[in-house]
Image (tube, rainbow, N blue to C red):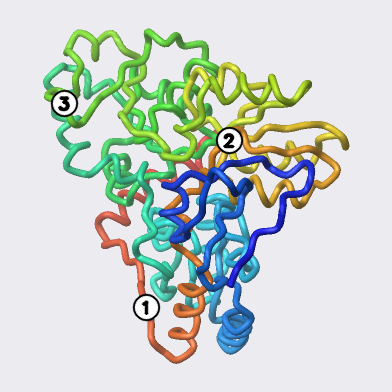
Amino acid sequence: MTTTEPLAPGSLDVQPTPLALLLLGREADPKSERGVECPGDLPAPSDPDLVERARAAKAKLGERVFVLGHHYQRDEVIEFADVTGDSFKLARDAAARPQAEYIVFCGVHFMAESADILTTADQQVILPDLAAGCSMADMASAEQVAECWDVLTEAGVADVTVPVSYMNSSADIKAFTGRHGGTICTSSNAKRALEWAFSQGEKVLFLPDQHLGRNTAVREMGFSLDDCVVYNPHKPGGGVTPEQLRAAKMILWRGHCSVHGRFSLDSVEDVRSRIPGVNVLVHPECKHEVVAAADYVGSTEYIIKALEAAPAGSSWAIGTELNLVRRLAKAHPDKRIVFLDKTVCFCSTMNRIDLPHLVWALESLAEGTVVNRIVVDEETEHYAKLALEQMLALP
């Protein structure tokens, strides 16, 4: 049985919501229990037997297995990761370990796809829970994007439009990007990717996160909000006119991150009123008004490094996934680190990868059974790799 201890001073001060508790498979009364833990009667995932079983299975596999842990994973999973990082760093780390027969990717589906694309044919990529998807990546299907390209063609702008797709996209969308001479980007190199794209054409189709595209173009490249239009795949013609498409520089896909998209200007104003002198640090997947009101904006890796370099005694409100914010707060007890929003905001699909799923995957591999293998077909892999290689070639 699990219990919840009172929060210590300086804790993250986050209020669980019923939805967050439901997504985590736990129960609690959010009116009476505050904090970043979601308490309940569920047996602890980090049960000592599970921990020992994970250690034993991993030891049995030895160098045949390489476990990757995304920054947003639960602590109990990160404990068994050989490396941690963002999605692209992890995929490259996997490619740099050709001796590993099995790549166990503790992340979400598109990340495992990228690892399969970048690793050798002899390596097998495993996703411990196939339900671990990404709502943002799912907001752009291959059929929808093909229809969008038809709309751009009819408007007479496809020939001067270069697709730039965020790493947080499916292999199909990466392949579309490669077929049409575009590139992939991360939140760290989005500006370089856009600069390259505008050297190749007059417009950019940015997929699938509208906020990263808008924030990069407006904050870092001098574009105006009027230079951006949003293509909505659920509306005829994307909900935009041919004239709007011809006038636009940035054609933004109507997608967003379910975690970063929830932060609001009210969140920023509230934390500033509660914590004098607080530094607001947010991810560029946040809405434009949130990014504009923040003190610092950057990728997950940027956020981690910024807090490492921050002076003792400083206060920080972080607008990104809660597992990472909790981990950063524990790692830097000399600083006050709080979650930007006052309600629990885990990435629900990332949280599907838990210790029981990891143990099951590792034990299955140790027994010679490959489970939940992620395989990208050869044609999709070829064109997706073209787009990824273009990103690697960015100046």
Pick the front one: 329 or 80: 329
Residue 56 visible to an observer of this rendering: yes
Question: Does residue 141 appear left or right of residue 329 in this picture?
Answer: left
Which quadrant of the rendered structure holds the C terminus?
top right
> Mark 1, residues whose alpha carbon is within 10 Å: few (<14), some, or many (≥20)?
some
Tell me which amino acid carries mark 3: Lys
User: Residue 342 shows which numbered tag?
Assistant: 2
In the rendered image, residue 89, in percent from the top left (x then y), is placed at 56, 52
In the rendered image, residue 225, in percent from the top left (x then y), is placed at 42, 11
Q: Secondary structure at mark 1?
A: loop
Q: Which residue is mark 1?
A: 371
Q: Secondary structure at mark 2?
A: loop
Question: Does residue 353 appear left or right of residue 369 in this picture?
Answer: right
Tell me which amino acid carries mark 2: Lys
Question: Does residue 312 appear left or right of residue 169 in this picture?
Answer: right
Residue 63 visible to an observer of this rendering: no
Residue 390 placement: quadrant: top left
